[in-house]
Amino acid sequence: MDTIAGTRWTPAEETPRSADPGRTWRRALRRRLLVADLAVILCWASTALAVGLYLVHGALAAMASPADAINGLGIVTGLAGTNLILIMVVLAARIPWLDRAVGQDVVMGWHRALGKPVLYLLTAHAVLLTVGYALQDGTSVIAETVSFLGVGDLLYAYLAFALLLAVVVTSLIAVRRRFAYELWHVVHLLSYAAVLFALPHQLSVGGVLADGTVQRIYWILLYVAAYAAILWFRIVKPLVGSLRHRFRVTAVEWVAADVVSIHLHGRNQERLRVSGGQYANWRFLTARDWWHAHPLSYSALSDDGGVRLTVRLTGSGTRSLSALRPGTPVMVEGPYGLFTKAARTQPSVALMAAGIGVTPIRSMLEELAPAPGEATILLRASDESQLYLWNEMLSLSRRYGADCYADLGSRSTVRAPWLSAAAVQRGVTLESVFPRITDSDLYVCGPSAWTDAVVRDAKRAGLKDHQIHVERFDW
């Protein structure tokens, strides 16, 4: 492989290990898997409860005609879809215990996976009820739709559906890439409004959630719980934490032509409980940036209350960060992510980063403080100008006796596209870079296409899902 001032540690003998070094890690893994399973069970159990409460309160007996049956099915799809969208709201609240169990990458994966089913269910809800009532009233679907629009609460429901459709469409990868992050984020916030706009017609139209019923109590509690989670974890807690820690910019340092490191200092940093490899949402309180939360990884932590963020200036939203002045106050929401040593399950560690993906790898390596021979590091870049923080990574690898490589050049288009074409021609593989790969935890951070290629090769090499830890910088 092409190596720039690389280092390879060669032990005189195999590093001794205890008979069972992974007992604590396996116990922690079982706890995390249990929490993940419980979260999934709770999701589907709540949806089943929402539908079940409706069915056991006379709904089945009321389906005496085709029109009634269609209306009943329309109500079922509406209840299921609304329950799932409230679960999406809860998942977006960034609840700490769920983050510590599976990480925000997995949680937001669940959130995105529910988007299309919710859209399908709520579309079916609107279509089925329109058709059912049209049959019941002996009118056309168009005439029935016009009559629905004349009902105030149903007009709010149509508006809610239109907002939800906009959110789902703009979240599709092919569409999302055409939007600036700031515009996409504003559109996505409309999902919270969409859910609230749908509430009035649930409580007032059709009598399904009539006053005094168990169903009505269930739905009100569900709405309150979902929005209380958003209010507390996304607004109140970050605001209180920011006032407690009072982070301010101390310096902005150019790392490369398109990369800067932002140095911050605050108070009571230990109460943040930050681990190397995590990220937080940062708001720099300037006239231009105060409204924009930047998800940035910690690239370095210090014991004196200082932290460092290293960011690539890829657009107007991040480019303005290079002009931050010392003393600028900063709000922080987080830290988030399980891309940390807490996710370890194996005696060895393989760390891989492409470009600016080195930032969480660098802070995690320092906190991990691996024993000699325990860690191997590979940094991928198109050329030397994109090999960010290389000198720091080299220094840390020497300190801890880790193997450290840099792979430079254009990516291979034949196989192993996470490697350079030159490395592939020389027969470099995942196993040759990481000889102990099957007994390793693999930490990967970089662009999605590159990361996906690494993960595919890792699974072909025999790694299980719990051994692979991914941090993505794509939004």
Image (cartoon, rainbow, N blue to C red):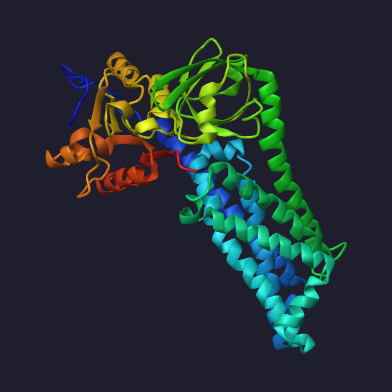
How far across and how far down the image is residue 440, in percent?
30, 34
Position of residue 308 in the picture relative to residue 371 (left or right) = right
* Camera-nearest residue between 214 and 161: 161
Position of residue 177 in the picture relative to residue 352 (left or right) = right
Position of residue 442 in the picture relative to residue 315 (left or right) = left
The quarter in which the N terminus is drawn is top left
* Residue drawn 52% across the image and 35% down it: 316
Position of 180 relative to 211 (above/below): above
* Residue drawn 64% across the image and 25% down it: 286
Q: Quadrant of residue 406?
A: top left
* Residue drawn 87% across the image and 63% down it: 211
Position of 73 relative to 22 (above/below): below
Q: Residue furthest top?
A: 304
* Camera-nearest residue between 218 and 104: 104
Q: Residue furthest left?
A: 426
Position of 319 relative to 113 (above/below): above
Q: Tell me how many marks there are.
A: 0
Position of 46 relative to 77 (above/below): above
Q: Quadrant of residue 216?
A: bottom right
How far across and how far down the image is residue 352, in percent?
32, 33
Position of residue 452 in the picture relative to residue 311 (left or right) = left
Q: Quadrant of residue 317?
A: top right
How far across and how far down the image is residue 343, in percent?
43, 34
Question: Could you tell me if residue 64 is visible in this image?
Answer: no
Question: Could you tell me if residue 111 is visible in this image?
Answer: yes
How far across and how far down the image is residue 398, in percent?
27, 15
